[in-house]
Amino acid sequence: GIGASLAGARTLVAMKHVGVNVALDPLMTFAYTGAVGGFVLVSADDPAMHSSQNEQDNRILARFAKIPMLEPSDSAEAHDMVRFAFDLSEEYQTPVMLRVTTRISHAKGIVTLSPWPDSKESTGFKRDISRFVMVPQYARPRHTAVEERLTLLKNLSERSPLNFVDWPEGAPGSPGRRPLGVVTGGIAFAHVREVLPDVPVFKIGFSNPLPIEAIRAFAVSFERLIVVEELEPFYEEQLRAAGIDCEGKRFFPLEGELDPDVVREGFLKAVGRTKEEIGERKEEIGIEGNGHIEVLPRPPVLCAGCPHRPVFNALKKLKADVFGDIGCYTLGALAPLKALHACVCMGASVGMAAGVGAVGGSKRPVVGVIGDSTFLHSGITGLLDAVYNKAPLTLLILDNRITAMTGGQQHPGSGITLQGTPTIQVNYVELCRVLGVRHIYELDAYDYEKSIAVIKEATSLGEPAVVITNRPCMLYPAKRKYETFHVLTDVCNGCAACIRIGCPAIELIAETTAKGLPKVAIKTADCTGCSLCQQVCPVDAIVTANGGRPVVFEGVEALVCNGNAM
C-alpha cells in the first residue's frame, strides 16, 4: 500500500485492529515520509472481542503515530468519510486512519451515493531521497514536518464539519445553561441518541487531533458534561488534561461493546436513578426505553465435516500440548475437544511450540498448529528459526485451501488471485524442505487412525517435523457433501464416543439404552459425510444410507462405499 501511494495511486488498506499491530512498524515511519497518492488505513476494532484475541482501542495507535483519524457512526458516514479521507491525505501528505468497529461493519443503513471522482492517473514514483529514505539524517527533519502537520490538522479538526453539535429538534441554538451535555463519537452516538433523544450532543467524527477548543465552547453551556465512548477514555482523558470538567468512565465500562442497554444503565448511574423511576419520571429524566430483548447466544463450533476436527481428536488422544494460532482451528480449544492449549496471535504457534521444546517445558508431545494462509502470512519465519535452532517440535499445517474463518479469501496457497485469475500455487512440501525440515508428512485429515499414527511418529523424532493435511474446507468455494450417515439406533449402546468428537450434526435423542443411556442421531441436513463419527464408533452403529462403510484415502476427494466410488 505504501509503495502504491508513493507511486501516486490512491490506496486503501483494510485490516482488523490486531492487523495494525503487524503493520505498525511501517505505519509509524510512513507518517514521517508522508503519502503521495491518498492513503487510507481502515482499522476494524472489535469491542467485546466477537472474533479477536484482544480488545485494543486503535484510536490510541492513531494518536501514537500522529496521523489523522476519522470515526464514522453509521454506513452513510463510512461512505462519505472515505472520500474525505482521500482528499485529506493528499492535501496534507499523510496517511489517514478510518476507524470502524464490529457494529459499524455489521450494520446496514441508507447511503446516498455521490459521484466518485475520476481515478487519477498514477504519477509514477518520483525520487526524493531526503523524504523517502528514513535514515537518521533525513528522519530528523521529517519528524519536524510531522509536528508541523499535526498543528495544521489540529486547526482543521477544530473547524471540521465532521465534528458538530447535534441539537434536539426544537432546542434553541443557544440554550443557556442546561443541566446535561454529551460528548461522543462512532457507534456510541447512535446509542446515545436512542437513549437520550432530547439532550444536546457534541458528535465527534474527526477524532485525532481531537477538537478540544470546539468541545470547550460546547461545554460552557452545561452544568455537567458526560463523555460516552467504547473501550478506553480516549476523549475523556484529553478533555480532562485540557482542563474541561467532564465525566465518563465512572458510569460506562472500560471493556466490552456499548449498546443502548449499557448506555441507558450508565446514564441512570449518572443521574442517580433506578429503572423503576424512569417510568414514573420519564419526561423529567429524559432517558428513553425499557431495554431490549435478549437474543439467545450461539457458541462458536467447528462446522460439520470440518477437516480440523479429526486432527484435534487425534491430538487429544495423544495428549499433546498444542500451541495454536488465529483461525478456525482456534475453536479446537473449546469443549468437548479442549485440544488446543495456548493461542496469542497470528504466527505465534510455531514460536511458542519451539520455545517450549527448547527449554524442555513439557513431558508430553509438543505440537504447533497453524492454517495454510496463516502459515504463509507469518509462520514461515518461525519455522525457519525453529529449524535453525533444532527445536524439538512438530508443526501441523492444516491446509484447507482457503482463508476460511474470515470469508473464503484466496491466498498464495490456493492458486487463484483475489481477482479470480490462476496464479502460482505454493507447494508446502517443497517450501518446508527448502527451510530445512527433514521430516515432512502429508496426511488425509479424514483418516483418523492414520492421523494418530503419523502425528505420534512425528512427535517422537526430537527434531523439527511438519505434518501437512490436505482436505479442503467444507464451505468454499461451495459446500461439499459426500454420502451422509445415519445411526442404527437398535445397535447404538449410548457410549457417546461420537458425541465427544464435537460435531454439530450429532445429537442426543430421547430413546435410551437398557442401562438408561441416551442414544444419538445424525441430522442428515447437517451431515457432510466426513466419516469421523463412523470411525470412532466402537459398535459399528453408524453407517451410510445403503449400509456401507466409507473408506477414506489420502488425497482423494471421493469416498468409497463397498468398493465402488460414490
Image: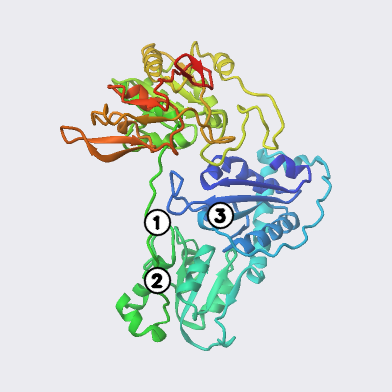
Image position, residue 366 (x, y; %):
36, 22
Q: Amino acid at mark 2?
A: Arg
Circles 1 and 2: CB atoms closer than 8 Å: no
Q: From mark 1 to mark 2, how far is it between C-alphas? A: 16 Å
20 relative to 181, above or below? above
Q: Give whichever of discs 3 and 2 has the lower sequence position.
A: 3
- 482 or 423, nearer to the observer: 482
The N terminus appears in which quarter of the rendering? top right
Viewer-nearest of discs 3 and 1:
3
Q: From mark 3 to mark 1, how far is it between C-alphas? A: 19 Å
Mark 1 crowdedness (10 Å alpha carbons): few <14, some 14-19, many ≥20: some
Label 1: element kind: loop
Image position, residue 129 (x, y; %):
76, 39
Q: Give whichever of discs 1 and 2 has the lower sequence position.
A: 1
Disc 1 designates what residue?
255
Image position, residue 51 (x, y; %):
46, 46
Q: Residue at x 72, y 57 (%)?
A: 92
Disc 2 designates what residue?
264
Label 3: element kind: helix
Q: Amino acid at mark 1?
A: Glu
Label 2: element kind: helix
Q: Which mark is residue 131?
A: none
Q: Residue at x 80, y 51 (%)?
A: 119
Q: From mark 3 to mark 2, how far is it between C-alphas? A: 23 Å
Q: Amino acid at mark 3?
A: Ser
Image position, residue 117 (x, y; %):
79, 57
Q: Give whichever of discs 3 and 1 has the lower sequence position.
A: 3
265 relative to 56, above or below? below
Using the rendered view, name the quadrant where residue 434 is placed. top right
Mark 3 crowdedness (10 Å alpha carbons): few <14, some 14-19, many ≥20: some
Disc 3 designates what residue?
105
